[in-house]
Image: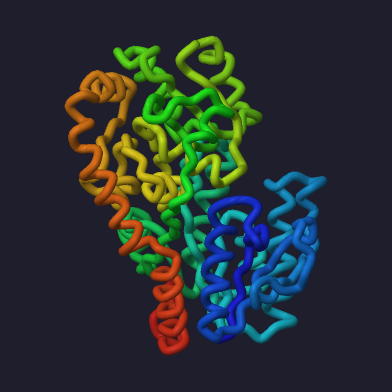
Amino acid sequence: MKIAFVSTRGIPNNYGGFEQFAEYISVGLVERGHDVTVYSPKFHPYKDNEYKGVHLKHIYSPELWMGSSIGSFFYDFFSLKDALKKEKFDIIYEAGYTSIIPAYIWFNVKNIKSPIITTNMDGLEYKRTKFGALVRKFIFWEEKMAVKHSHYLIADNMGIHDYYKEKYGKSSHYLAYGADIHDDYDETLLSEFGLLANNYYLIVARMEPENNIEMAIRGYLKSKENGVRPLILVGKTNTPFAKELLKKYGNEKAVRFLGGIYDFKKLNSVRYFSYAYFHGHSVGGTNPSLLEAMASNCFMLAHDNIFNKAVLGDNAFYYNSDVQVTDLLNRMDMCIPEKSKMVNANLDKIRSEYSWSHLVDLHEEYFKWLMQDNGKNRTNE
């Protein structure tokens, strides 16, 4: 099969979830004999036209001077134009929908018979509170347009799958992200951050309201764990919400903002040696950082929503308010006996359901099904 991945910021991965996914899946598909192209912005530091057998198409993106919010619309438009007009792909995999919809409408992809276009719907983007009311309304319209114009839909979480079925009466194919289990954790790396093994709570997240970071902070500060084991936050501190958190809690001795950690070995070691890990993401999808925390032996304390429960099941303790966070931390001596069982169960789930080799197999099977289905079960018909 000849397959294209569109709307990522290119490979090798320098950015995040979709890029990590594109790298693992594209390389894996090439190893199985398929012809795969990943579209990449020209500003990506990797300039070669091939990476581990994957073809790279370097497309102009004005993001560096226009900003990602606007620039990504142009980049996606130019990428899709190239994929439709200059190449003869069997399948185009669209990573997310929020900046591709104008191109979908312009090129009338709804009525294109070939190539087959399948869209990963990501999370419930219109619920992200970092966006203003008008932007959220626009993104909700984009969601509807993605359902209307895409040939097929992908959901990376069963909660997302159920949402599209209930909201639009449309089927989607469940295909998750992946994670690797490592064995190179290094306790000596903690000294750089002033941390002691198994003696801190951890949050690794984008500093945005929908990740419920402040809920965890407030609950922690009211608990008996305040000052016993510090609460460590990892993530960029240059967002408006991060600056607000720093203003409110930056002087709390037991709450420490480390900023971003971009060395993966260091980050995995910080995860591995944590006492417990807060995962507060709440707007949908299978978050890559959740899988990475599970793969790093983290003891999970998770926000109570259908998306996190779809991944973690019974192998986490849940909260949905700062009061519940406080109660949970005050009962940690009762929770800790469950730690080993839950951690091992989550590791088993990574091995069986979220390993990259398994997900390459699932994506290959899905792409073969798309070719065989040949439009019979298209979402937009």
Please identify the quadrant where the N terminus is shown: bottom right
Please name whichever residue, 109 or 180, is drawn nearer the observer in this view of the structure. 180
In this rendering, position of residue 25 left or right of residue 372: right
Asked if one can make out residue 102 in the rendered structure from this viewpoint, the answer is: no
Q: Is residue 345 above or below residue 357?
A: above
Q: Residue 320, percent across and down?
A: 30, 30
Q: Is residue 341 above or below residue 376?
A: above
Q: Residue 317, percent across and down?
A: 25, 36
In this rendering, position of residue 109 left or right of residue 205: right
- The outermost residue toward the front is 188
Chosen colour scheme:
rainbow
Please identify the quadrant where the C terminus is shown: bottom left
Say which residue appears at 40% left-offset and 33% top-offset: 274
Say which residue appears at 48% left-offset and 18% top-offset: 255
Say which residue appears at 41% left-offset and 52% top-offset: 286
Q: Residue 47, percent across and down?
A: 79, 64
In this rendering, position of residue 248 left or right of residue 181: right
Asked if one can make out residue 364 in the rendered structure from this viewpoint, the answer is: yes
Q: Is residue 346 above or below residue 91?
A: above
Say which residue appears at 19% left-offset and 37% top-offset: 338
In this rendering, position of residue 357 left or right of residue 350: right
Please name whichever residue, 222 or 79, is drawn nearer the observer in this view of the structure. 222
User: Which quadrant of the view contains residue 330?
Assistant: top left
Tag count: 0
